[in-house]
Amino acid sequence: MVRIVLSILLKTYLFAIFPCVVQARDRVSVNMAGDWLRRDWDHCRENVTAQHRNGAFEIHSDQAAALFWQVPTQNGTPLPVDREQDWIKRCDRPPTGFEKNIRKQTGGQHRLISATEYPTISWRWRVSNTIDDSQTTNDKGEIQKSGDDFAAKLGISVLNSKGDLREIAYLWTRTIPEETALTQVTTVVPWVLKFKWYRIVAESGDQNANQWVAESRNFYADFKRFYPKEEPAEIVRVYLMSDSDNTGSTVTGAFADLIFQKSKEIAD
C-alpha cells in the first residue's frame, strides 16, 4: 500500500513539474520541424521544394516527385542519420538492409516507436488541389506508373516481428473513394528483388482543398488488414510526399501534427 501511495505521489509530482513526462508515455509527436531527409528520382534535381511554415512541413511539386523522410523515435526527435553518406547526398533510396540496421543501432533515448505499443496515428494535412486519378490504377487495383501521382501521401515503413519490411501509405485522391486499398510494386533489382506496398485512400475529393483536414487511423488494424498472419514491430521510417511527375501536374501539400498514440480510439 505504501509503495502504491508513493508511486501515485511521484507521478503527480512529475506531472506538475514536467507534464510532458507523463503525456509522452501515451503519445509521441513527430517533430515536423526536424531533420527531414530527401529522396528523389533525379539525384536531388527534381523540381520540388519544401519548407517549414507555422509548425507544418509544406511540399511544392511542379511536374516532379520527391519524398521527405525521417526515422521517428519515442522521445519525439528524429534518429540522427549521417548526412555524409553518398546515398543521402544523391537523394537516393536507402540501401538494402538499412531498416534492419536501424533496429540494431537504436536504444536508450532513441528507442524506435512500436506499432503495437502505439497503434494509432493522427495528423493534419492540406492540399492546394487534387490530381487526375483516372489512370492511377488498373482493373486489379494496382497503381500504374502513368498515374502514380497523389496530392498528398503519408507513408509508414515498419518491420514485422521477423524483421521483414512492410509499408502502408495514406493517400489524398481526386475520385478514388475513401478506404479503397491500392497496391504498388517497387522493383529494387530487376527480376531479383521486388517489394509490394499497400496504400489506403484516407481523403478523396476537392471539396476540402486549401483547408486543413484532420485524419486518425488505427495503423495496427490497417496493418492486420493486409498482413493478417503477421505482427508489426518497430516503425523505421515515416515519409511525406506530394507527387506530380507522371501526370505533369503541379500541387502543394502540407502536413502537421503527426502523432503516434497508445489509445486505439479513433477520433471523430
Image (cartoon, rainbow, N blue to C red):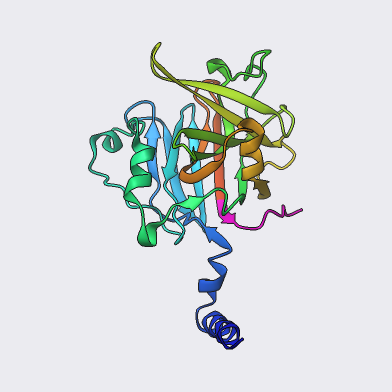
121 vs 154, nearest the viewer? 121
Q: Position of residue 237 (x, y in %)?
A: 45, 43
Looking at the image, which residue is at 52% across and 81% down? 14
Instruction: Please determine whether, in this image, residue 47 is positioned above or below residue 116.
Output: above
Q: Residue 125 magenta-drawn? A: no
Q: Is residue 22 visible?
A: yes
Instruction: Please determine whether, in this image, residue 142 is positioned above or below residue 204.
Output: above
Q: Position of residue 30 (x, y in %)?
A: 50, 55
Looking at the image, which residue is at 27% across and 37% down? 89
Looking at the image, which residue is at 49% across and 24% down? 245
Which residue extends farthest top? 191
Q: Position of residue 193 (x, y in %)?
A: 40, 19
100 vs 170, nearest the viewer? 100
Instruction: Please determine whether, in this image, residue 2 is positioned above or below residue 63.
Output: below
Q: Quadrant of residue 110?
A: bottom left
Query: Which stretch did the figure color magenta?
Result: 256-268
Looking at the image, which residue is at 66% across and 19% down? 141
Which residue extends farthest front? 1
Instruction: Please determine whether, in this image, residue 217 is positioned above or below residue 29.
Output: above
Q: Is residue 129 visible?
A: no
Rendered-image quadrant of the N terminus = bottom right
Q: Position of residue 82 (x, y in %)?
A: 26, 46
